[in-house]
Amino acid sequence: TNHCSHPPLQMSLVPTPLNELQSILAIRSPTGDQYVTYLGRTPRERFDSLFEGAAIAFLGSMFSYFVSFVIGQFLATILGTIFVFWPILAPEFKAYQRNWELCGGRDLIDVWMDDDE
């Protein structure tokens, strides 16, 4: 057999202070790096992101036009505005969703602080 015997790694998990953890993680608003990630890093990803946003904006505005006959012009105008601005709003919503999933909706706690403080 082809076994490589490596010695076990000597590591331990050390809690990170809250201020250091907040500088590492994007907790509240999305960072510029998150925008770049969602907009695409390669030309193909950028094209896909642009095409997705344009398709949602076009099809959504057409949908809001036809649904305006059913739900009324005011609500359809609000819905159409969301669809038209979707290419701008999508990275923000996706980043917020990812940040929320990272924390599970909970606030970060500092493990170095006592309950009395």
Image (tube, rainbow, N blue to C red):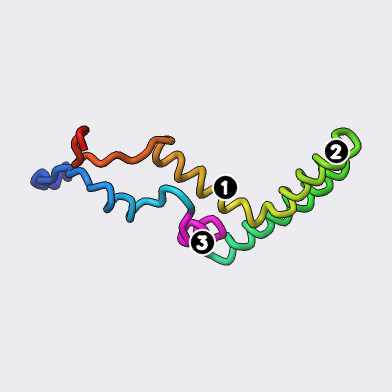
Q: Indicate which disc residue 67 carries.
A: 2
Give the x, y percent position of residue 103.
39, 39
Judged from the image, the secondary structure of the residue bearing numbered disc 1 is helix
Q: Indicate which disc residue 93 carries.
A: 1
Give the x, y percent position of residue 7.
8, 46
Q: Quadrant of the N terminus?
A: top left
The answer to which of marks 1 and 3 sits earlier in the sequence is: 3
Span colored in magenta: 30-41
Mark 1 → mark 3, Cα distance in angstroms: 14 Å
Q: Residues within 10 Å of mark 2 (few under 14, many from 20)?
A: some
> Label 3, on which residue?
36
Is there a contact, CB below 8 Å, between mark 1 and mark 2?
no
Q: Nearer the viewer, residue 99 or 50?
A: 99
Q: Which residue sits at x=22%, y=47%?
A: 16
| Residue type indicated by callout 1 | Phe
Q: Which residue sits at x=48%, y=52%?
A: 29
Any part of residue 5 in sight: no
Please identify the residue farthest to the right as the structure is shown.
Answer: 69
Q: Is residue 26 magenta?
A: no
The answer to which of marks 1 and 2 sits earlier in the sequence is: 2
Judged from the image, the secondary structure of the residue bearing numbered disc 3 is helix
